[in-house]
Structure formats: structure tokens, C-alpha cells
Image (tube, rainbow, N blue to C red):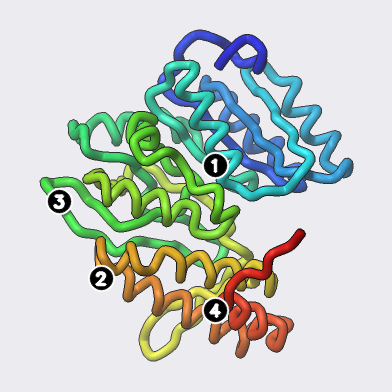
Amino acid sequence: MSAATGVRQTAPRVLVVIPTYRPGEQLLKLITDVHTQGFPILISDDASPVTADLVLREVGGKPDVHVIRHHQNEGIARGLNEGLLAAIEMGAEFLLTLDQDSEVPENYIDDLVNAFTALASDRVGVIAPAVIADNSGDITYPTTVISGIATTEEVIQSGALWKVTALEEISGFDEKLGIDAVDAAACLHLREAGFLIALTPAVTLRHNLGNSRQVRILGRTVMVTSHSPARRATMVRNRLALAPAEFKQSPRHAFRTVRRVTVNSVLGAVLGKNRAANAKGSIAGLLPKKQTD
């Protein structure tokens, strides 16, 4: 990253990028925890109102932390790509992506880098914690071992360590998706390019996934999120947009994804707050997006 950005010009192994929107005090703790691990941080704020000024000014005043503030909300993918471009410019090998409400334990970054390096494979595009400690309970991924490497089809972007050259090969994150399924699309494109999506038990990330809760239905544990009707519409719409390529690349994973989105939509309409609005939001995702002037 150039001197104009305010981040050091030496080449660290990892650049940390944190997209934000209306960040609160939790961001201060996250920055402190990451900063003590010795890696530069780029914060890309997605048009937060002035109520976030104090927090963003405070974190931006720390060494090796640079804040970019936007005046138009365009979603998380833009911020992730800004991190990718900065990582390329400063010669970083990896990009660590985090959400503003994630919690990273001590030595998280070094442990994740060491786990990636230990795989000794040039076809791993991203590595992520095998377990996400969500407020609703632990989240795990379906796992397949390939050449001795624990792999899955997609991971959430928060807490994931991406190989910069692999992201370059797939042209980064899809900004047309805005916020939902951005990480799923990146993993899909990595798999299409022949990269593996790796998991490691070496680290655990604490993260709050959409104020979710887990319920048991027919012997299965399923997650019910409390996303707004508008977010439900984009979640359904973006997943449908990815579905043809997903079915071509991995029919099993595509089926699981469609089932998961369907169950979450139904449960949101049955068990969640604002049930009628949630149902309308999910149905709206089945329709073409209305164009605005």
C-alpha cells in the first residue's frame, strides 16, 4: 500500500481488511486484538452515518491502521476488494477478512498462517476455522479430505485467510452481489479455478452470524437468522444467481445450499419476528430486482 494510504510500505505477510457499517465499541476491541498481533489493518467503511465518526476516528489514529470512508453504501464486496488491491500493492501474501463484530483470540493470525503453510500445497485458495463459535452455538462445515487436506465447498469470509494470488486469479470478490453470498461466490470461483477451500482446527473464531439461533427439526439442527425482509430478499436472489454454476461445479453442495436457504426462509416466516414481512422478503428474492433510477 502506498504512502498515500497511511499504511507502512514494508511487505507484511498478511494484510487485515475489515469492512464496517455503523461500527460500535466492539470494533475498538477487535482492532486492539488484531493490532497487538503485528499486522497492518485496512478498514473500509460503507457510508456509515456521523454517529460512527468517533469510533472510526479513534481506530484510524492507531499506527498501521488506515480507514477509508465512502459516501455511498455499496456492500461488503467493495471493501474486501479494497483490501485485496492494498494487499497486492504492498506485496502481502495473504488477506485476512474480518467482520466488525468478530472476535479473534491471541495469536489467531500467526496460527492461521502456520496452518496454511503446513498444508504445503499451492492449490489452496483460502483456509478458515473448522469451527465458528456463533452466539447460537458452534457452526461447522461438511468436510471432505482431499490429498490429506480437510476441505469444504464454502466458508464465511469473516476469519478466513485468503491467498492473494488466488484471489487475483478469480478477479476478487463479486461487487454485483453487494453483501450476501459474496464469500460463497468467491469460494465457488476458487473451486472452478482448481483451488481448494481448506479448514483447520488450529483456530476458532467467535462470530455473531445475523443474530441467529439454532433449532432442532426432524433430528437436524438448523439455523434461523433474524435478517431483515430486505436482506432475506437479497440472500435468496443472490443464491439463485449462483445456483446454476454451483450445480455444475458441485451438485451435492448446490442442493444443500438450496435446502438451507429454503428452510431458513420458511422458518423466518414461521418462527421469526415480523413473520409476514419476512415471508414477503423471501418471496421478493424469487423475483427480478426492481431497477431504480
Can residue 78 be spotted in the picture?
A: yes
Q: Position of residue 203 (x, y in %)?
A: 39, 43
**Which of the numbered marks, if any, corresponds to residue 251?**
2
- The quarter of the image holding the N terminus is top right
Q: N-terminal of the two: label 2 or label 3?
A: 3
Three-letter residue code for mark 1:
Leu
Disc 4 marks a residue whose amino acid type is Leu
Reading the image, the residue beneath label 4 is: 286
Circle 3 SS class: strand
| Helix, strand or loop at mark 1 | loop
| Location of the C terminus (image quadrant) | bottom right
In the picture, the disc for residue 146 is: 3
* Residue identified by numbered label 1: 98
Q: Residue 15: horizontal and vertical position, in percent?
A: 50, 26
Q: CA distance from mark 1 to mark 2?
A: 29 Å
- Image spot of residue 69 (x, y percent): 74, 33
**First in sequence: mark 1 or mark 4?**
1
